[in-house]
Image (tube, helix red, strand yellow):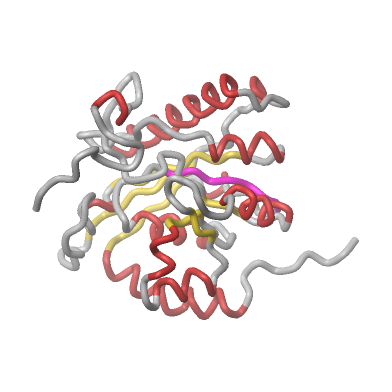
Amino acid sequence: MPRRKPEKLIRWRIVAGIAIPIFEFFGRYRMRGLDNIPKRGAFVISPNHITNFDPLTTAYLVWRGGRVPRFLAKASLFKVPALGWLLRFTGQIPVVRGGGGPDPLAAATRLIAEELAVIVYPEGTLTRDPDEWPMRGKTGAVRLALEHGIPLIPMAHWGVQRILPRYGGRLRFFPRSDVEMLVGPPLDLSPWAGRSDAKALSEATTALMNEIARLVGELRGETPPAERWDPLAHGQTEYGKVTPPTR
């Protein structure tokens, strides 16, 4: 049997050695459920999405769980000086909103073929739910998991919005914020195994978002809404308001 190539290459260790101390300066992070992160093989992990600080939080958790984080990230981020270089250097996957670019799921499939971890935010953007609960999800995470027969891991975090507000603003350095993170067991996808029709993908995505909401509720000590908030039902596009708010 060929020797498995290590994930935590020197470039990753260099980035982690620089980034983690800075990241830990912003908050106190409590992680639960790390045992639910597979130690080997490909998997998809799907967190809730509250602020633009979330990817750092999720990457930190996946790294502490013994794996290397790889994202489907907005293509516009790759144009940001320094950040764009870092994203390319660490093998992140650009996603063009509204299509028109390379298929991000095809790129994710290549990572899966290499038995790597892929982080997919099923909401596709920051939640629009007024109370910051997970909203209606998209089918990409479920499609990857079903197509390749790999674990789909729900994850939740709460408290990151105290470091960086949902729609921007300044990073909050002091006092350090408490951030809770919780990884759930793999979602049971057996009811939809071998299926790729729209109904199956929709049902499985609803099950995923409900489980993420349940985990968020556990962190918040609250009961989540019975149904996920739908931006289209509230006069919004998939990525934001139809009419951008004035500043």
Which residue is depicted at the point 16% across and 66% down?
Answer: 174
Q: Which residue lies furthest to the right in this view?
A: 1
Relative to residue 131, is residue 86 drawn left or right? Answer: right
Which corner quadrant holds the N terminus? Answer: bottom right
Relative to residue 227, is residue 12 drawn left or right? Answer: right
**Magenta-drawn segment:** 41-47
In this rendered view, identify the residue nearer to me: 109 or 163: 109
Q: In the rendered picture of this protein, how many numbered marks are placed on residues?
A: 0
Q: Residue 8: name its quadrant.
A: bottom right
In this rendered view, identify the residue nearer to me: 147 or 13: 147
Q: Where is residue 190 in the image (x, y as percent from the top left)?
A: 67, 24
In this rendered view, identify the residue nearer to me: 179 or 73: 73
Q: Residue 107: name its quadrant.
A: bottom right
Report if residue 44 lies within the magenta region.
Answer: yes
Which residue is depicted at the point 38% across and 32% down?
Answer: 213
Q: Residue 196: name its quadrant.
A: top right
Relative to residue 150, is residue 232 drawn left or right? Answer: left
Magenta span: predominant SS is strand
Q: Where is residue 23 in the image (x, y as percent from the top left)?
A: 34, 68
Report if residue 39 lies within the magenta region.
Answer: no
Q: Where is residue 189 in the image (x, y as percent from the top left)?
A: 62, 28
Which residue is depicted at the point 49% across and 31% down?
Answer: 208
Which residue is depicted at the point 46% across and 76% down?
Answer: 85
